[in-house]
Amino acid sequence: MSDRAKLLLVDDRAENLLALEAILEPLDADLVRAASGEEALRRLLHEEFAAILLDVQMPGMDGFQTAELIKQRERTRHVPILFLTAISKDAEHIFRGYSAGAVDYLMKPFDPLVLRTKVAVFIELWQKTVEIRRRDALLAEQELAAVERESEVRYRSLADAVPQIVWTADANGVITYRNERWFELTGLGRDTAIAWQDFVHPDDAAATAEAWSEALRARTPLDAEYRIRLADGSYRWFLGRALPTPDGWVGTSTDIEDRKLAEERQAFLAEAGWVLGSSLDYEQTLADVARLAVPRVADWCAVDIFVDGKLERLALEHADALKLALARELEEPMLSAVTVATRTTEPVLVKEIDERALAAFRFNDAQLEIARTLAPRSYVTVPLTARGEVFGSVTLVTAESGRVYGDEDAALAQELARHAAAAIDNARLYAEVERRSRAASALEAVGDGVVLVDRDGVIRLWNTAAATITGVSEAEALGRRIEDVVHLWSEIAPLIPVASQPGEPVRAETVPVEFGGRELWISGSGVGFEQGTVYAFRDLTEEKALEEMKADFVATVSHELRTPLAAIYGSAQTIRRTDIDLAPEIRDQLLGVIASESDRLGTIVNDLLVAGRLDADQLPVSVERCDPAELAATVLESARTHLPENVELELRVAERIPGVVADPGQLHQVLVNLVDNAIKYSPEGGPVLLSVANGDGAIRFEIIDTGLGIPASEHRRIFEKFYRLDPDMTRGIGGTGLGLYICRELVRRMDGKIWVESKPGQGSTFFVELPAAS
Ligand code: ADP
């Protein structure tokens, strides 16, 4: 509203308006003309007037009608109207004018002074109204300001009351307001001009700056985590949130140090768990964990392990090597303090290490000095326990970080100790399992049968050798009672010596045991222990058979040797006699006996020598091309020298026989043996045929007799060493059981084959095949 008053002059006659203007000119007001009622109303729509001077007599809308409309409008209702009229002086007119809202009624011609005075009153009134309105407005403004002030105070005290830092910044990011919490936490003076870089941790500056400019660019809320430097120089984690406002930013910074620590603890535990689980070398992993703990959850970390009942330091970690070296001086008193701490399974937490706490370590003066230099703040020691056994401890200490340990940290240490203990336990169990599995595989690999029978007589272990020796599989034996598996166990068991404890010497005994109808000779012994008895045994069946064979052999050979010796001795004695006169032919006969029996002795001894050399693999073979027919002929020739009368020898050689590849001396011996046998085992006499034929790339010798024959079941065994069909010589035919063994071995060495076809009572045919010369 302008300060100058306006007067609206309404008259249809310009000369009247001019006259009015002339009268009112000296007044402090702007004069506005209107030539009709309509124009006056239009003017009133847009402007405010101190008063209206209204002519009554106008063509169209007259003064009264105009006044009525003015009075109807809310905004113009109170504008004073002065009617101007020349004619209507009568009372009715005047009444109409007042009822239409006139404040005065002036007759033309006017007295200028009176008119001016009257109008001036309205101008003054208007000015007062304006002044009042101005004052009102001012007052309202002041009141508003007061309210605003009050709300700001309220807002600030609210901001000061919240635990967060609250701040506002202008659009350029310059901090315009910080709440009390800010000053409390950072200790930065109220007058200090600050940029956020002054208090945000340098490591977090880049990320924070990026978040800020991103929020600024996108006009989106800002969210960032950063560390703020506190009054004492340490840092704490805050979560910053800021919202853009029309004139900048309003933001909060919430202390999330505890959450961050918890996260850090969780992350550390997870990583420590991973490290501990990554290897079975727990000494190494524990040292790794100590390294992991510093500085994330501690400034110092010590891991101590009991070795033979004495606590020893496995690892000590600190970021500063110099301090580490100093701390080693404190090892002994610290270890004894930790030893005390491990007597309970609970963690020992010392929140503030004061002089009294230091005294508890019983440091000597020099050590105390070092301890004070290192200035530990808090510590927590937790024992490492598994299966109720304490095998060490972990100690976390704070110093330069200024952290004070609380219950959460004790819980963390305990959790770490649990992880570590589990890892150690695992490693030990694994080592034990490893040891057992090695023992088990040794048991499986060993050649001796090993059987564990528990206290109830049930078989709990039956190794591979036990299965091989007995022919009873592990599956068949395990879980069954030993007497159900071993035939006549109750009779055998007392024969097996059992030591009452491991390590006690005991001699194994050889006992016969039957498995599946097979008799085995088993040499076994046992050891009793708390879970039962372990039996170890080996199969001596073969050894036993060999032993028997050897005994038989000794008997046979001695008999074989004694017979010719007796004949030689008898003949010699007879020749030496002087009391009787021997006829020359008798004498010749006796000498003949001596010669042939000596020969027989020589053969036996030779066989023994050859067999021995074959066993020792000391018989050289040198093959060459030989004539098979010629060889066969010499064999028969030498046989004829001692041929019984009832046996006829025959040689049959196929035509165009090629050479044979053999050691001639050894092939000769093979054929001699076979022909001798054919003669020997034809006690009734009969033909003995030696045939030489051409086989498929081989030369085949056949020695055919019509003698005793050999049962099919013995066809293989007769080639075994010392094996004889009739060891007791019921038929009176002697022998060492070496002849065929020697034949087989010699033929094998010359890359040939030897076998027999025979039936008892129908004679035998021995075949020898050797490579033909090309
Ligand atoms: P021995 O010195 O007993 O003859 P050998 O090894 O030469 O030993 O023969 C082994 C066994 O084979 C003999 O004891 C005999 O029972 C049997 N045997 C060997 N040759 C014949 C054969 N031609 N006819 C019947 N039995 C034979």
Image (cartoon, rainbow, N blue to C red):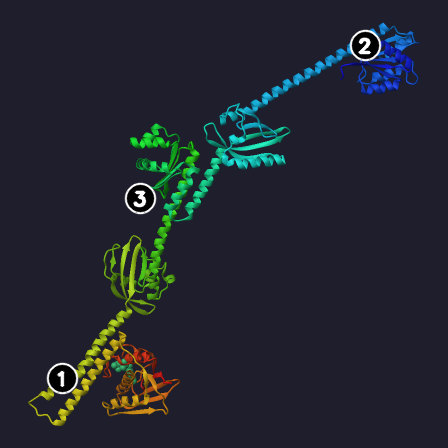
**Which label belongs to residue 538?**
none
Is label 1 within 8 A of ligand 1 (CB to nearest ligand atom)? no
How far apart are the alpha carbons under marks 2 and 1? 192 Å
Label 1 sits on what residue type? Tyr
Residue name at image x 27 percent, y 72 percent: 545
Q: Is residue 485 left or right of residue 125?
A: left
Write down the quadrant of residue 597 in the picture: bottom left
Residue under pointer 3: 307
Write down the quadrant of residue 140 in the picture: top right
Quadrant location, the C terminus? bottom left
Instruction: From the viewer's side, name the closer residue of 504 and 383.
Output: 383
Residue name at image x 34 percent, y 68 percent: 516
Position of residue 471 measured from the top left corner of the image (x, y, whole percent): 35, 66
Label 2 sits on what residue type? Leu
Query: Looking at this rendering, what residue extends furthest in the left direction?
Result: 579
Q: Is residue 100 visible?
A: no
Q: Is residue 173 visible?
A: yes
Residue under pointer 1: 569
Against 60, residue 284 (above or below) is below
User: If the picture is divided into quarters, which one holds ligand 1?
Assistant: bottom left
Against 528, residue 381 (above or below) is above
Q: Is residue 292 left or right of residue 49?
A: left
**For discs 2 and 1, the disc positioned in front in the rendered view:** 2
Position of residue 374 measured from the top left corner of the image (x, y, whole percent): 36, 32
Asked if the residue under mark 1 is in contact with the one under mark 2, i.e. CB atoms within 8 Å, the reply is no
How far apart are the alpha carbons under marks 2 and 3? 117 Å
Residue under pointer 2: 27
Q: Secondary structure at mark 1?
A: helix
Asked if the residue under mark 3 is in contact with the one under mark 1, i.e. CB atoms within 8 Å, the reply is no
Q: Secondary structure at mark 3?
A: strand
